Every structure is written in structure tokens, then in C-alpha cells.
Amino acid sequence: MRVRVRLFATYREIVGRGDLPWTLSEGGTLGDLLEDLLAEHPGLKPHRGSMLLAVNREFATRDVRLRPGDEVAMMPPVSGGAP
Amino acid sequence: MIALRRTRIDVEAVLDTVRRQDAGAVAVFLGTVRADPGVRALDYEVFGPMARAKLREVADAARARFGVLAMSIVHRLGHVPLGEDAVVIACSAPHRAAAFEACAWTMDEVKRIVPIWKSELPPSPAKARARRRRKDRAGPRRPRASPPRRG
């Protein structure tokens, strides 16, 4: 099935584009997609632990099953700054 | 009001969106671009549709949690020069404690869950060159002459 992957800020710079069409097997999870993506773009690996993930504009965990046409967002932690 | 803007934020206009006759307090927070060394401006990038939805979610949660009457959040995007407002949060409540608390909590939540990222813009190459030239002309630093003695 095909999904759309969106990358933001430093992740977009690492991969070189902000929008990637992606194909994964039926019933694949967000975690599966993430592992495939990290294998193809190893520059993202150091960010594995801090990545924010969203599916269709809602934060999501790695066990979420994806459906065809889903929009997956991979985002760095949002703007910091001390309180 | 929830808004993302690429131009300067009109703070008075944001305040007007939360003024109400049953409010005894209006609190406002301005997040401004600080002149840290080597920073000329900040550049804000957004995941627009999700950011708008999350800003609405934060404002609704603040209303429910603190009993505020109205809450507005406006975030600036793109290039924001030093000293200008990057985010404005305004809220009204019957009494000041709720307004202060809601404003502070809302800013923390915006920083936690709203997909907006900032990057620092260094001084432009032309300005950096000019600064180096000025420094070169000034020569090595010498201790300042002591003031003339009196008498």
C-alpha cells in the first residue's frame, strides 16, 4: 500500500526532501515504516529516539497500523527554549 | 482566535479578541526573539494544518482546565527579526490568578505539542565582513589610559 511521508525541519534537510511517497506491505505499522525509512536514510538514525510521529495530523505510536493513503509526519521535537 | 502569521503581530488586536465584560483580568504573554550572540533573527517553520489543530486543542484545554473565558494564540512564521514577537498568547478570566496560570500553561503546551520549529539565522555575510573590517582597523586591544592625575 502507498502512504505519504512528510519530513520537517532538520529531518527534511537530512533526507533532502520534505515529501516522500512510500510503499509498504499491507497491515504494516508506523514502526515498520520508520525502520524502512531509517534503513534507506541512515542520517536519520541518531534521531530515532526523539522523533515525534503523527498519522493524519494526530500524534501516533509505533504500533499503529497504517492504511492506504495515510499521511505520516516525522518531526523533530518542537521549538525548545527554556521556560 | 487561533492564527499563524507571516507578518508582525498586532498585540492590541489580539487583546481585543479576548476582552469581555464578564472578565476581570486579561493576561498576555509575548515570546520575543532574543539577541543571543551570533543571532540576527529566528526563522520559524510549521506543519500548518496540524499546528492549527493543536493550537485549537491547547486553547480548548486551557478553557476547560482554568475556566478562562477566552483564549487567543497567534504564532509568527518565517523570518522574525530580533526583538519582535514570535508568539502572542492572550486570555481573559473572571479573576487574575486563572488568567496568569492559563497563560503560562498554554505557552508550555504550545512548546510541547504544536509542530513549529525555529532555526537561528546568523548575521548576513556582508555584515559579518564589515564587523571583521572594523575589528581589524581597531588593531589589538590596548589597556585604556588612566585618567590624568589632578593637582
Image (cartoon, coloured by chain):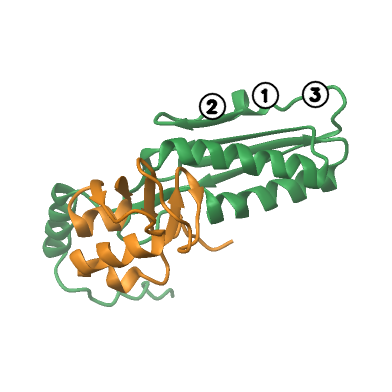
Could one spot residue A66 in this view of the protein? Answer: yes
Residue A40, position in %: x, y? 19, 64
Location of residue B46 by image quarter? top left
Left-right relation of B117 to B131: right
In 3D space, how far apart are the residues under numbered discs 2 and 1 (Cα atoms)? Answer: 11 Å
- The chain carrying label 2 is B
Would you place residue A50 above or below residue B86 in this image?
below
Looking at the rendered structure, whether the residues under marks 2 and 1 are on a common chain is answered as yes
Q: Nearer the viewer, mark 2 or mark 1?
A: 1
- Horizontal relation, residue B12 to residue A70: left or right: right
Chain ID for green: B
Asked if residue B141 lies left or right of residue A82, the reply is: left
Q: Which color has been applied to chain A in this rendered view?
A: orange
What type is the residue that disc 1 sits on? Thr
Within 10 Å of disc 2 (Cα), the crowding (few <14, some 14-19, many 20+) is: few
Q: Residues within 10 Å of mark 1 (few under 14, many from 20)?
A: some
Q: Earlier in the sequence, mark 3 or mark 2?
A: 2
Q: Check residue B20 in the rendering and tell me which mark sits there, or answer none.
A: 3
Q: Amino acid at mark 3?
A: Arg
Q: A26 or B72, which is in the foreground?
A: A26
Q: CA distance from mark 1 to mark 3?
A: 9 Å
Residue B20 left/right relative to B42: right
Residue appearing at x 54%, y 63% in the figure: A82
Q: In the image shown, does B135 or B127 lie closer to the viewer?
A: B127
Closer to the camera in the image, A49 or B100: A49
- Dot 3 crowding, Cα within 10 Å, few <14, some 14–19, many 20+: some
**Disc number at residue B10?**
2
Residue on which disc 1 sits: B17
Name which residue lies at 77% across and 34% down: B92
